[in-house]
Image (cartoon, rainbow, N blue to C red):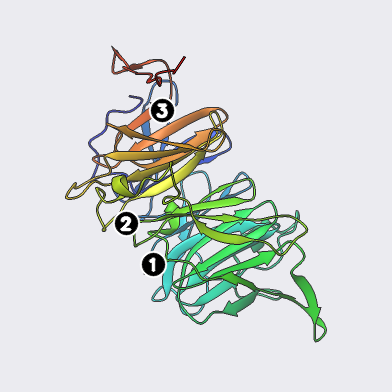
Amino acid sequence: MLTNSVLGTNNKGGFTMNGKLYQIANSKIYEINTTTGVQTEKATLGYDATTDVLVYGGSIAIISSSGKDLKLYDGATTVSTITTDPASFPTANTGILEYCRGYSFCAGANILYISRPITPANPEYSYDFTGSGSQSITYDSNIVGLKATMNGLYVLTENKVEFLGANSLQNVAGSAAFISTPLGEGSQPMSNLGITASGDNIYYLTKNLQVQRISFMNGTSATAVSELSARPIVSIKEFLNTIDVNQPSSFSFFNQNDKTIQFHLRSVGSPFNDYVLVYDEVNDTWNVDTMKSYNYVVRINETYYGFSDINSSIYIDDIGYSDGGVPIEFRIDTQNINQ
């Protein structure tokens, strides 16, 4: 454990900026000393709700939460309300932010708002969604998730997956405009925070308890939305039947140290995340971890910090070979060989 904390209810967000670790809890922002675990109050956010944070540069953290105005944290002691957010905010804000190739994106109901093109001289354009050069795209159903990869931005709506590729910025009627391309139908993601990118692949858990993967093939039109959880031999459908259909704090992330996608979920009836469904990309296998109750994970270099879903404590994850001082048990099963 890095920080043993009882501030507020539980963690509502976490992010890193300039190599420092920050925590959102108790309606405030705290800086966490990654050596001693000491929490230092930096600024007041003003609400205690799940957040999505987009960090740009060394002094810009855009904070979004459903039904709230966009907030700006300056990396010091000030949180201010952004006045260049969409006119429909805060009512339409769904608390979804993403950055991709020099633009910030935020979602309001069925409209994707695109910032002004960010320049080195004007980093404040990263939160300007109303100025000259800002854009918007209207979809036929609400946006429930955004995820950037090396090749572009995936927009997941309630019933469809769309893609804004790296070359989608085209000149239309004398002005630049993003072109959104539908990829196909897909089940609705459980949450935006539960969508994870690994290279050009996207992974997410759906509301009908499937793990789906979007696979992008560079130079082709063969991008596919497929179910990963019901394949022969490596099916995990039986396990997915043991998790709750309501996942208010579920999330996932890509662990670069061991190349795994880790889904943090609640079992049926659990009041907090108590399962970790792990997909090993290298070996194409599944595993289930328990006794980890995180609702956010933040990476600084090769170290991962897990934010508790039960309270406002923070843990250093995936370090050593013991669990609270007790050696981690493991078992290897081999098959009998017919000689």
Left or right: where 143 falls relative to 150: left
> Label 2 neighbourhood size at 10 Å, few (<14), some (14-19), many (20+)?
some
According to the image, label 3 marks what residue? 317
Structural distance between the alpha carbons of marks 3 and 1: 31 Å
Dot 3 or dot 1: first in sequence order is 1
Three-letter code, disc 3: Asp
**Which is closer to the viewer, label 3 or label 1?**
3
Instruction: Confirm whether residue 248 shows in the render.
Output: yes
Structural distance between the alpha carbons of marks 1 and 2: 10 Å
**Which residue is outermost to the left?**
269
According to the image, label 2 marks what residue? 49
Between 157 and 40, which is closer to the camera in this rendering?
157
- Image quarter in which the N terminus is found: top left
Quarter of the view holding residue 276: top left
**Local SS, label 3:** strand
Instruction: Confirm whether residue 23 shows in the render.
Output: no
Quarter of the view holding residue 174: bottom right
Residue at image location 40% in from the left, 19% down from the top? 334
Image x and y of residue 105, in percent: 58, 64
Image x and y of residue 243, in percent: 26, 49
Q: Where residue 68 is drawn, which disc sits there?
A: 1
**Local SS, label 1:** loop
Dot 3 or dot 2: first in sequence order is 2
Three-letter code, disc 1: Lys
Between 200 and 42, which is closer to the camera in this rendering?
200
Structural distance between the alpha carbons of marks 3 and 2: 24 Å
Image x and y of residue 306, in percent: 39, 35
Between 139 and 305, which is closer to the camera in this rendering?
139
Residue at image location 68% in from the left, 62% down from the top? 222
